[in-house]
Amino acid sequence: MILRKSNSEIPPAQSNVGSGSAEQEGITASKAKSETSKLTWLMATDAWKRQYKHLKYRFSLPLLRRVIAVERKQASTMVPLADVPTALLERSLLAHYFILLFTVPASLWAAYITLRGLSAGIRFDVWFNAWLIQGIPLLIFCVMKALTSNKTRKLILSELSIRHQETIKG
């Protein structure tokens, strides 16, 4: 509650005698502005606007778009296989054997974990369990990595055999 002095209590030096209504409008406008700024500060609308602009920019996924553009550019770049040295192909073949050595048992372990999660879901009706949360992504990753590595290994072996046949003939 705001207490105001009546006109009789205001001393003559402080009275607004001779001032027009424009000064009073300025005072009320500044009061309204200060109350509006207090309300704006309280509701934090400026902060919400800044956050909205920030989130709008982030939801446009700028990093993902840039990564996809770089990947498209690299995918369109073709390296002639004849330029790749045989020693590099042999090292790559060895690396893919190591990848297969670790991803195939990991795939089997992920399949086991996933089956445990499915059985817990069926038996206890608990579908949100740690076995499924760990098993499904691990299974997908390991199987895809093993399949990709096996395909690459086969392609490297075929190229090495072609090169070997060329050295025998030539």
Image (tube, rainbow, N blue to C red):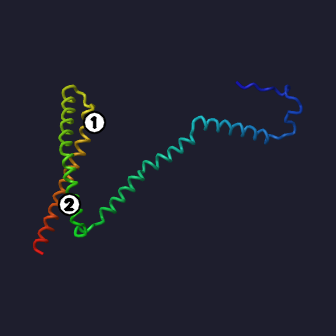
- Separation of marks 1 and 2 at Cα, in angstroms: 38 Å
In the image, 4: left or right of 158? Answer: right
Name the image quarter holding the C terminus. Answer: bottom left
Q: Amino acid at mark 2?
A: Glu
- The correct choice, above or below, for 120 with respect to 85 in the image is above
At horizontal 37% and vertical 55% (from top left) the residue drawn is 67
Near mark 1 (Cα within 10 A), the count class, few <14, some 14-19 or many ≥20, is: some
User: Which corner quadrant of the image does residue 89 belong to?
Assistant: bottom left
At horizontal 86% and vertical 33% (from top left) the residue drawn is 14
- Looking at this view, name the residue that lies furthest to the right: 12
User: Which corner quadrant of the image does residue 28 belong to?
Assistant: top right
Q: Which residue is mark 1?
A: 133
Q: Which one is closest to the eye, mark 1 or mark 2? A: 2
Residue 3 image point, x, y percent: 75, 25
Earlier-in-chain disc, 1 versus 2:
2
Foreground of the two, 96 or 135? 96
Secondary structure, mark 1, is helix
Residue 159 image point, x, y percent: 17, 64
Q: Amino acid at mark 1?
A: Ile
In the image, 69: left or right of 100? Answer: right
Secondary structure, mark 2, is helix
- The correct choice, above or below, for 138 with respect to 154 in the image is above
Residue 96 image point, x, y percent: 21, 54
At horizontal 21% and vertical 35% (from top left) the residue drawn is 113
- The correct choice, above or below, for 81 with respect to 10 in the image is below
Q: Which residue is mark 2?
A: 90
